[in-house]
Amino acid sequence: MNWFTGLVVYILVWWVTLFAVLPLWVVPADSSDLGHLAGAPKHPRLARKALVTTLVAAVIWLAIYALVRSPWLSFRGS
């Protein structure tokens, strides 16, 4: 895996992980708040979610990198 392929894989893993992390720590806003829909979160906590996403995506990417570099998974003939 060269650096460009590693970067593309990390970006893809990061986005998939973001969509898995977004529902965490969601508290619905009060329905009396003007400008908020009923399902909108009261405090989105996007910085925390971005940090968690980055850390989890890094761990997943390291596992993918180790699997690609290992001799267990090889698409080349011996």
Image: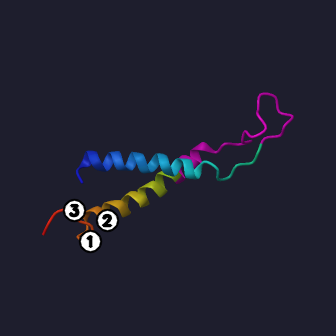
Badge 1 element: loop
Q: Position of residue 48 (x, y in %)?
A: 58, 49
Q: What amino acid is at disc 2?
A: Leu
Whole-number angstrom distance, CA of label 2 to CA of label 1: 7 Å
Badge 2 element: helix
Occupied quadrant, residue 63? bottom left
**Magenta span dominant secondary structure:** loop
Q: What amino acid is at disc 3?
A: Phe
The answer to whether the residues at label 2 and label 1 have Cβ atoms under 8 Å apart is: yes
> Which residue in the structure is indicated by mark 2?
67
Q: Is residue 43 left or right of residue 11?
A: right
> Which residue in the structure is indicated by mark 1?
72
In the picture, the quarter occupied by the C terminus is bottom left
Badge 1: few (under 14), some or many (20 or more) residues near its Cα, within 10 Å? Answer: few
Q: Residue 75 shows which numbered tag?
A: 3
Q: What amino acid is at disc 1?
A: Trp
Occupied quadrant, residue 29? top right
Q: Where 12 falls versus 72 (above or below)?
A: above
Q: Give me the residue at 81% from left, 28% from top.
A: 34
Whole-number angstrom distance, CA of label 3 to CA of label 2: 12 Å
Q: Give me the residue at 40% from left, 45% from top.
A: 11
User: Which-is-in-front pick, marks 2 and 1?
Assistant: 1
- Between 78 and 13, the residue placed more toward the observer is 78
Magenta stretch contains residue 71: no
Q: Where 59 falls versus 53 (above or below)?
A: below
